[in-house]
Amino acid sequence: MTKTETLAALRGRIAHAEAVARRERGATTLIAVSKTRDAAAIQPLIDAGQRVFGENRVQEAQAKWPALIDATPGIELHLVGQLQSNKAEDAVRLFDAIHSVDRPSLVAALARAIGKTGRAPACFIQVDIGDEPQKGGCAITDLPALLAEAQAAGLPIAGLMCVPPAGLDAAPYFALTARLARDHGLTGLSMGMSDDFETAVTLGATHVRVGSALFGPRG
Ligand SMILES: *Cc1c(COP(=O)(O)O)cnc(C)c1O
């Protein structure tokens, strides 16, 4: 399959899941997660029309994206991996959205970076939905306070993000994340990866983060 065909097939599966759930067609943004892929692997997807990409490391993204962004207008870059506070300013300069806001120290660092750079990436609060602290994400019980803090600091909060536990049915975790977002009046839902994005779309994902289904297995 060409990258154009792979992308069309994936978009078709998203559209079908949207239809099944009686959601508006196009309600879901596909983030092509290009971590570990070099520019030569990314370019065919850009040529096929994909414009929204995700990376999980600031330094890796800094090494490959500025040139790609200069070459193609309209690229949108999302940080989907954990973020150290000392990289907050670099992240704010490069990324259009940050999906891993998960603690007060990072909220403060991002607020400072936004003030300094005048850029304001859309922020998702990552929730530790499966009680796996090593993965990052704020504990469910800490969400109300962190959200209030982020809003008070002026971060543009787009919604919630989750990574459900591996090897378990993701649906209950997606449903719980959707309920938490609704309870807090948030509309954005970053959830679903290669193995479960259709389930996430039927449960209300506004952003799915898909890597290997687009690029092939990671080495
Ligand atoms: C790598 C990664 C993805 C994409 O995973 P695939 O299984 O390759 O689709 C999505 N979200 C996060 C946070 C990731 O680190």
Image (tube, rainbow, N blue to C red):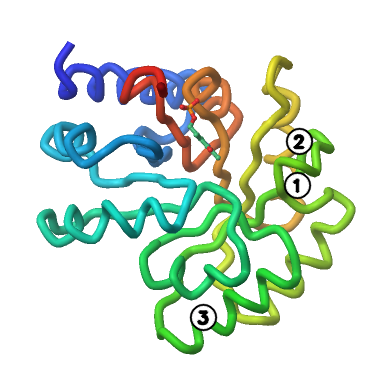
Q: CA distance from mark 2 to mark 3?
A: 31 Å
Q: Position of residue 154 (x, y in %)?
A: 60, 80
Q: Position of residue 195 (x, y in %)?
A: 52, 18
Residue type at mark 3?
Ala
Q: CA distance from mark 2 to mark 1?
A: 6 Å
Would residue 21 be found to the left or right of residue 180 on screen? left
Give the residue displayed 23% in from the left and 22% down from the top.
8
The answer to whether the residues at label 2 and label 1 have Cβ atoms under 8 Å apart is: yes
* Earlier sequence position, callout 2 versus callout 3: 3
Q: Position of residue 176 (x, y in %)?
A: 76, 36
- The residue carrying mark 1 is 180
Closer to the camera in the image, 210 or 35: 35
Can you tell which of label 2 and label 3 is closer to the viewer?
Answer: 3
User: Secondary structure under badge 3?
Assistant: helix
Would residue 78 be found to the left or right of residue 147 on screen? left
- The residue carrying mark 2 is 176
Question: Pointer 3: residues within 10 angstroms few (<14), some, or many (20+)?
Answer: many
Closer to the camera in the image, 149 or 2: 2
Give the residue displayed 34% in from the left and 19% down from the top.
216
Residue type at mark 2?
Leu
Quadrant in the rendering for residue 97: bottom left
Give the residue displayed 12% in from the left and 54% down from the top.
72
Which of the labelled discs sits on residue 113, or is there none?
3
Q: Position of residue 118 (x, y in %)?
A: 41, 85
User: Secondary structure under badge 1?
Assistant: helix
